[in-house]
Amino acid sequence: MMALPMINKQTIRCPNCGNHAQRQHFPQLQITETACPVCDYLMVNCQKTGNVVESYIPGVKQP
């Protein structure tokens, strides 16, 4: 039987709109995902390097 990855969840304030957002830590994948259901903010970071893996920030123009 394959072990499922342990996921740590936190409720934080969204850095984009200030409403409640969810931050999930995936230790086996070495990523952290922050998502806000109110403004559709999404940020996925590598835990090891801090680099952004994926992002979507409404209201911020991306190059």
Image (spheres, helix red, strand yellow):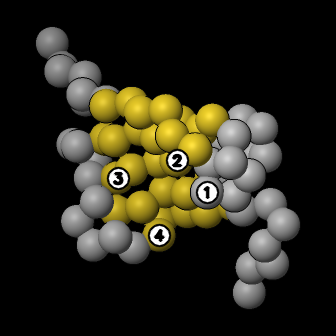
Q: Judge from the rendering whether residue 3 lies leftward or rightward of residue 58; answer left or right.
A: left
> Which badge, 4 or 3, is on the more N-terminal residue?
3
Residue for badge 4: 52
Count every numbered label the image shows and give the total: 4
Q: Which element carries disc 1, helix, strand or loop? A: loop
Q: Position of residue 31 (x, y in %)?
A: 34, 52
| Marker disc for residue 48 | none
Say which quadrant the C terminus sits in.
bottom right
Q: Is residue 35 visible?
A: no
Inter-mark Cα distance, 4 to 3? 9 Å
**Is residue 50 visible in the rendered structure shown here?**
yes
Disc assigned to residue 15: 1
> In the image, is 35 to the left or to the right of 37?
left
Q: Is residue 50 above or below residue 1?
A: below
57 lies above or below 26: below
**Could you tell me which secondary element the residue under label 3 belongs to?**
strand
Evaluate if marks 2 and 1 touch, with contact meaning CB atoms under 8 Å apart: yes
Mark 2 vs mark 1, foreground winner is 1
Tell me the tag on residue 31: 3
Between the residue at mark 2 and the residue at mark 4, the CA separation in whole angstroms equals 11 Å
Circles 4, 1 touching at the beta carbon (< 8 Å)? no
Place of residue 60 in the rendered image (x, y in percent of width and height, measured from the top left): 78, 73
Q: CA distance from mark 3 to mark 2?
A: 10 Å
Q: What is the CA distance from the residue labelled 2 to the residue labelled 1? A: 9 Å
Q: Amino acid at mark 2?
A: Thr
- Residue at 47 percent across and 65 percent down: it is 53
Would you say the residues marked 4 and 3 are in contact, meaning their CB atoms lie under 8 Å apart?
Answer: no
- The quarter of the displayed image where residue 48 is located: bottom left
